[in-house]
Amino acid sequence: MRTESSLVCEGLTKSFGGISVVDSVNLTIPSGKVVGLIGENGAGKSTWSSMVAGIHRPNSGRMLLDGVEYAPESPADALHNGVALIQQEIRMALNLSVAENIFLGRLPMRRGRVNKDEINERSADALKMLGVSIDPRRTVRGLSTAVQQTIEIAKAILREPRYVIFDEPSASLTATETDRVLHQIAVLKDSGAGVVFISHRLDEVRQISSKILCMRDGKVAKEWETGAVPTEELVQAMVGRDFTFAHKKPVAASEKIVLEVKNLKREGVFRDISFSVREGEILGIAGLVGAGRTEVVRAIAGAEKADSGDIFVDGMLVKIKSPSSAINAGIFMVPEDRKTQGLNLAQTSPINIASPWERVLRKKGIVTPSWLRNLAQESTKDFGIRGSLELPTLRLSGGNQQKVLLAKWLAGAPKILILDEPTRGVDVGAKIAIYEIIRQVAAKGVAVVVVSSELEEVLGLSHRVLVMSRGRQQTILDRGKATSQTVMNFAVGLSSESLK
Amino acid sequence: MTEDKKELVSDSKKASFIPPVRIFKASNFRMLGGPLIGLVVLLIVFSLMSPYFLTAQNLSNLLQQVAILGIMAAGATLVILIAGIDLSVAAVMALTLMFSAWLYESLQLPFILALAAGLALGAAIGAINGMLTAYAKIQPFVATLATMSICLGLSLLITNGNTINGFPTWFSEAASADIWLIPLQAILMFAIFGFLSLWLKFRPTGRALYAIGGNEEVARLSGLNVRLIKTLVYAIAGGLAGVAGWLNMATLDSAQPTAAGSYLLNVIAVVVIGGASLSGGAGTMGSTLLGLFVVGVINNGMSFSGISPNAKPVVIGVIIILAVLADRKTAAAN
């Protein structure tokens, strides 16, 4: 690799409050290649990329961009130098048009007004190259996450960057959308840009990278000059020890039906949803983003109201009209987004864990700090939650936050536990731990429902898999019959996706 | 379940990710830091300015002066905790006292009953505020702005702007009575603060306010009846405004339609200076009490200073800015 045409980091270090998050990192991103960057949450990947993109300033070390000293003062500065970062959380100006978002901050003018023709034309070209056809004049509001991400990529491409970092681009995408993003990355690479692909999806990393770097504890733990590295080896480097992804076969469920859903419907969202879950059974719900899975479980858990249909718990009809009526019926849900729906980030773990139970358990009494601490300590031990109990949950890693969220709902002894995307944004080690927790919960006799976009996860955990597509229930497959192929066939249905 | 999982979770980096934070036993103390220092500084400054400031009699006066404001601020604290705001608090006070006075004078209702009716009216208006906010989903700012306007108007309408006098003597005597130099009004205020403080800290419904203020959706999904609790909180604030109305009537020995005065601004100033966040979820009765004394000391101390009383709002405004900035610095240091 010619050093003139690469992004080099030498001894890059960043500390927050005395703890070094990125520790003396040396790495090189060659142009025209895709480098995969893997590592657990907290390994330092995001912080490293934020330094390259000008969001944070390194405490020591330096960077060289094509041989020239590179020290961006701000994201705008980095963009100016040809370095772009596509972040995981896309924030667009929803009320502006696609084209306006793409050219945000540098709208070309003509005679004192925005040159709409130019931005519309150039946006349309860029989007077409990325394989997406939407009208650049329409507003962003209402477009799916996947499309917004494509717009973000178009925005970056039009800057003609020399280096682009993708931070978890496929985290909330379906398989088809992911393929499109990977294709877009290839397009970028072919145009000569150096691409960094940060992801937990090891298969994708192996697929497109010609070089893989693994970070651990703020350092570069291992480098491979090829993408064809066995998954086990990648995982081992990430966590520093051996284990496999193989899901254990779940303990057999009993015959007793705990949850029964009949003809659940919500106008325009889902209909004719009927299924049952037995004691000790794990029912997976698979489907593409937008199939209505989350909406269905939210209706069962009382977070939203269904228009019609019946829900039976232990054979008795229950009226679910609010979260508390569901909780009283023994139906608990671990929501999809732990940061906005699951946890009160400003508060500590014990307070979060106890929150739904204070009224129930302390109806006539008072809530004391020691009662809280006991409650929390039990959970912390059971789930292996790391991080001080005195700190706001905001400070915990994604994996530990998710465990706190699980602890919160398991503290109440559910009859039926619904988990919506239980391992989203969670590192490998915590993922494995959470799978084990789910299996053990089921083994204790709880009826478990798992909604997940990760096919491997759904297939590995479930006794049976319910596949949804466009608000309808397509089939329920037994574990033996459920393979990636069959599930995907049902999930996709027969029509192609349109984006308008 | 435990041992295996601990092996699997590679967590040494998790522990290293959390900066070392020294937490005092009562973490509230951290939050009180700024305003507490400010209060001490003010006490020193004013006692240097005048020998009459730090006397028992003046401190007793000080307590008397802050009682009404304090009771309204207590209610405002609860509302601000749930990320709401109540602009009508002073107007409700004025309306309830006019209402009570009118019931007593024109309808010859027994005085105690009239007072009780005033309190009930305050709570009812508060409940309306709560329902407009929680059920009709009108922004608290807008809803309470509207009720403020309505209440101010009604206060004037009741007597066409006239004052009502002639209350039982025990009433005004109670207003100026004290036990060992601590005014009865202040004792009432401290009792309210104490009760609410314990409620907020130990009772589930009180603690629910922090949950709602921190993240309303999370609170709802956790099974809390958020709308009902919000309505209850606004109703309490309205009721406390009614109590403040009693004290106001007793102190002035008359019911004046203009009783609302500039209380609103001072109420919010007190809560904010004490350290509560207007975005909800943070703040305690203790912090509001501290803010109350900061404002009270400024108003009281400046009377000795020879500076025009018109300068008081100016000083309060400056202190608000300083308090918020100082609070942010303390939070950043954590």
Image (tube, coloured by chain):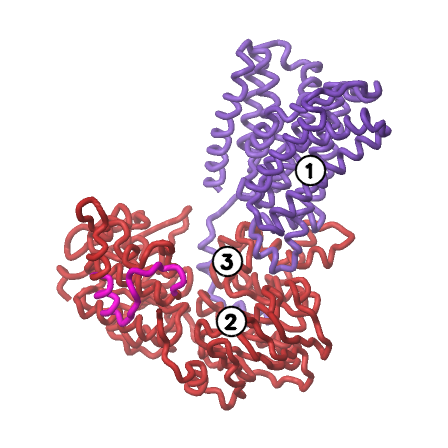
Q: Are marks 2 and 3 in contact (CB under 8 Å)?
A: no
**In x, y percent, where is residue A41?**
42, 62
Q: Which residue is mark 2?
A: A268
Q: Quadrant of residue A127?
A: bottom left
Q: Which residues are magenta?
A: A122-143
Q: Colour of chain B?
A: purple
**Residue in view at x 46 percent, y 49 percent:** B19
**Badges 2 and 3, same chain:** yes
Circle number at residue B238? 1
Q: Secondary structure at mark 3?
A: helix
Magenta stretch: includes residue A127:
yes
Q: Secondary structure at mark 1?
A: helix
Q: Residues within 10 Å of mark 3 (few under 14, many from 20)?
A: some
**In x, y percent, where is residue A316?**
73, 76
**Badges 2 and 1, same chain:** no
Front tag of 2 and 1: 2
Residue type for callout 3 = Lys
The earlier-in-sequence mark between 2 and 3 is 2
Q: Main SS of the magenta segment?
A: loop
Circle number at residue A339? 3
Give B102 or A360, whichever is nearer the viewer.
B102
Q: CA distance from mark 2 to mark 1?
A: 42 Å
Give A300 or A219, whichever is nearer the viewer.
A300
Q: Quadrant of residue A212?
A: bottom left
Q: Residues within 10 Å of mark 2 (few under 14, many from 20)?
A: few
